[in-house]
Image: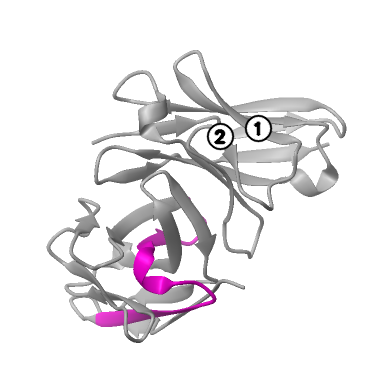
Amino acid sequence: EVQLLESGGGLVQPGGSLRLSCAASGFTFNIYAMSWVRQAPGKGLEWVSAISGSGGSTYYADSVMGRFTISRDNSNNTLYLQMNSLRDEDTAVYYCATMTSVEEIDYWGQGTLVTVSS
Amino acid sequence: QTVVTQEPSLTVSPGGTVTLTCASSTGAVTSGYYPNWFQQKPGQAPRALIYSTSKKHSWTPARFSGSLLGGKAALTLSGVQPEDEAEYYCLLYYGAVWVFGGGTKLTVL
């Protein structure tokens, strides 16, 4: 059974940093690309970032380019999102999700809440 | 700034059929955008329904189908059930960037 467990969310001040983790199990982690998707309170879904199975290719939405860094540790089956220079508008539930290919986002975690506020 | 547009809300009767659409500000949606569809119920994580325009996941109920319709991606629900009341999101691929639509709130009434 595929399981994705996000952690690392919390309250942070504007301009601060936070690192999210997504622990994966139940599948061969290193052959799946992975994505981060966020959802601001009461709003829709927003794709944030993606990374290839090897970690050699990374992709970002314009809204986070230069501030967020996606990475993965295939030896520990864990996906990360390093978030720097956080803004109020980054407040959201952050989900990690598996990507079988560019065609397909399939399994989702339950999300972790990030609140950016002074 | 690429915008993906969905109907904000739709209402359907139980047992009826409804089609949700997904349009791109860049022009006609084709199979090369690999449309995905997701269902989200309040307080839950999204659940994948359709990928690559019309392909179903192993858990996708048979009443859900995906297609291209009039230059848009489309999700059709046939024989709607009360439990289908939810928010539905489409996702399009723009070559290393993915963009979600704003979502359609489907009410079953």
Rendered residue at 44%/72% (across/down)? A28
Residue receiving disc 2:
B8
Secondary structure beneath dot 2 equals loop
Magenta span contains residue A83: no
Q: Quadrant of residue B81?
A: top right
Q: Quadrant of the C terminus of chain A?
A: bottom left
Q: Amino acid at mark 2?
A: Pro
Q: What chain letter is assigned to the residue under label 2?
A: B
Horizontal and vertical percent for residue B45? 58, 63
Horizontal and vertical percent for residue A22? 41, 78
Residue lying furthest right: B15
Horizontal and vertical percent for residue A49? 29, 59
Q: Quadrant of residue A85?
A: bottom left
Q: Which circle's residue, 2 or 1, is located before the other in the chain?
A: 2
Magenta span contains residue A34: yes
Q: Quadrant of the N terminus of chain A?
A: bottom right
> Quick check: can you spot residue A30?
yes
State the residue in front, A19 or A43.
A19
Residue receiving disc 1:
B65
Q: Amino acid at mark 1?
A: Ser
Horizontal and vertical percent for residue B102? 46, 41
Instruction: Please identify, in this view, whether the residue under mark 2 or under mark 1 is nearer the observer.
Output: 1
Which segment did they paint magenta? A18-44
State the residue in front, B60 or B5.
B60
Is residue A27 left or right of B12 when viewed as pictured?
left
Q: Are marks 2 and 1 in contact (CB under 8 Å)?
A: no
Q: Residues within 10 Å of mark 2 (few under 14, many from 20)?
A: some
